[in-house]
Amino acid sequence: MNKSDSEIVASVLTNGGYTVTTEIGKAGIILVNTCSIREHAEERIRKRLQYFKSLRKNSPGLIIGLLGCMAERTKVALMEEERLLDLIAGPDAYRNLPQLLRQARQGKRVFNTILSADETYADITPVRLDSNGVTAFISIMRGCENYCSYCVVPSTRGVERSRNAETIVKETRDLIENGYREVTLLGQNVNSYHWQTGDQNVSFSHLLEMVALINPLMRIRFATSHPKDLSDELLRTIARYGNLCKAIHLPVQSGSNSVLDMMNRKYTRKDYMDRIIAIRHILPDCAISTDIIAGFCNETEDDHRDTLSLMEWVGYSAAFMFKYSERQQTLAADTLLDNIPDEVKDRRLKEIIDLQQKLSLKSNSEDIGSVFEILVEGISRRSKNHYFGRNSQNKVTVFPNTGTRLGDYVQVRIINATSATLIGEPV
Ligand code: 5AD
Ligand code: SF4
């Protein structure tokens, strides 16, 4: 999500006459795009800002700005507190950046953290940053109104709004013409994507179909799905098109009904299991990944064991696992006690990570002997004679380079596996 936003910012500024540099010493402006989702992310950004401030010694006119969720959350407080920022812009204020920068260059401290009900940056063609030329992200909606009790997103990114479907199709077409072979459609809750104009009524399933039909060589992924909104219709659409990837990221957060209720996730363990059964039934070769939070308010050992048992039951191929971190301006911070001791959170998180390690290894080992179509994304970090790419299930696969190029599709037979990687040979 953040990378996609940075690409919108780069586009706004390029159109405003600025250029992007990869050498920090040459930059006249440093804009730090931020996430507030966990406290840890904010701490890292504070440290980075101190470092950027030190660059002012050699570059006196250097402008330092903060963008995104942390800008929205802390607003001017951070500017006052640390005196290291010249500019603050929330996630809906990027069009205003050229004007804010003009004022900042006159020595003013400027900010715009107004959230919008309709900004989707639909007409902005992102400038691809740090791109491999093969895979890209397209933001299809902004904001969230699910109000999960632990989550700061509804307060930092505003109300949910979907982007014009035609601009999404056009952006995908431009990407394929420029050699890209995979797009990931991004939103906090893509299943509630909904765009209407005149008599056209586009749901997320329709949108996926429109994008899938552009070119069978273009792979389509999407994130993130909310379990309460993942419909059978969507699963059937994914089944119909070979280029709609067979990988679903379905954050569960907890396996315990009482914790799910306190999290305001709006589904039960059974509802979630029913969605997994539907995926297994309609998309038998689909990989399922998840997000899990350890040590949420009032979580008992039984609740924690419910999470472990659900993980085992699903057999996730991968997971992002977090320790609960209380965020201001959330329902949980206002109404629940962050009452699980840190060492208990750490131990539960470790148990979750250890189990996932086993499940990932099991899931990957089951692929040994299979042949997958791999989209080549780059040269392996470990060996320049090896390429890496992903299969439809989003599993990273490493194989010897036998003369293929980035962006090619290669048939690879899996001969070995670790918990993180499939190892194969072209067939
Ligand atoms: N503490 C820990 N993890 C969180 N997440 C969101 N908010 C918090 C929080 N306050 C996790 C959720 C979400 C992912 C993007 O980040 O698992 O799905
Ligand atoms: Fe946060 Fe829940 Fe919205 Fe995801 S769905 S962004 S966890 S409020």
Image: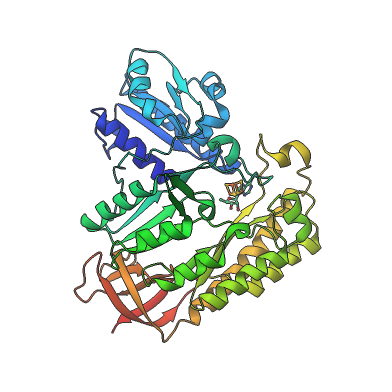
Residue 247: image location, x then y, percent = 47, 67
Residue 316 vs residue 193, the one in the foreground:
193
Look at the image and tell me in which quarter the C terminus lies: bottom left
In the image, 72: left or right of 333?
left
Residue 79: image location, x then y, percent = 51, 21
Vertical placement of residue 88 versus 319, above or below: above
Q: Is residue 315 visible?
A: no
Vertical placement of residue 172 versus 365, above or below: above
Residue found 56% across the figure and 43% down from its top: 144
Occupied quadrant, residue 280: bottom right
Residue 100: image location, x then y, percent = 38, 21
Residue found 71% across the figure and 71% down from its top: 309
Residue 236 vs residue 196, the one in the foreground:
196
In the image, 257: left or right of 290?
right
Residue 309 vs residue 265, the one in the foreground:
265
Coloration mode: rainbow
Q: Residue furthest front?
A: 199
Residue 198: image location, x then y, percent = 42, 44
Residue found 79% across the figure and 42% down from its top: 337
In the image, 80: left or right of 4?
right
Q: How many marks?
A: 0
Vertical placement of residue 6 versus 49, above or below: below
Q: Is residue 380 visible?
A: yes
Q: Residue furthest bottom?
A: 369
